[in-house]
Amino acid sequence: MKRRINYEKNYYNTNNLKQYFILIISCVCIRTKKEIIQLDNGYYLETIIEETPTTRASNQKTAKKTGNYKNAQGTTMFSVTVTGTFTYTGSSSTCTKSIASATSKNANWKISSKSASKSGNKATAKATAKRYVDGTAVETQNCTVTLTCSSNGSLS
């Protein structure tokens, strides 16, 4: 009967044991910008830009801009989001993709339509929301959110 003493001895001998550890740390740092716009009708629009991280060498950016349509008490009625992908060169920028989404945040408000468009360095989402009381639409609000990329990649 053979014993495996040598194997065990070598295994536990730290001089002969090589261990390799690969530690991958993923850091998702999303940059955000927030702005509040007071509207004439007593409501206000809170816009938030969230930029998806890219490598520094990349000349492409993807970001989303959300407009939260809020009442005077600060309650969100509905939200409209445009997600845009842009390429920029330092002297110009172009929107290559635009996606719109819209969601109701209040039981009385319903999204009746939404659309996305792109033009030059802008990605735009448009949505129409209606407020219902007892099954009847009593108010209609249109909301447009536009995300712009400058020639150096700055988003607004």
Image (spheres, rainbow, N blue to C red):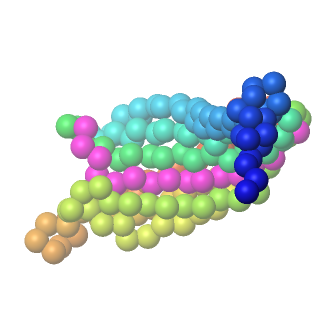
Position of residue 126 in the picture relative to residue 134 (left or right): right
Residue 119 point in image, percent of width and height? 72, 55
Position of residue 118 in the picture relative to residue 88 (left or right): left
Q: Quadrant of the N terminus?
A: bottom right
Q: State the residue in front, 125 or 42.
A: 125
Q: Can residue 139 be seen by looking at this rendering?
A: no
Q: Residue at x 56, y 54 (%)?
A: 82
Q: Residue furthest top?
A: 15
Q: Residue furthest front?
A: 1
Residue 107 point in image, percent of width and height? 21, 62
Magenta segment, which residues? 74-89
Q: Residue at x 29, y 55 (%)?
A: 105
Q: State the residue in front, 137 or 48.
A: 48
Q: Residue at x 38, y 71 (%)?
A: 112
Quarter of the figure with residue 32: top right
Compared to residue 94, the image places residue 37 above or below, namely: above
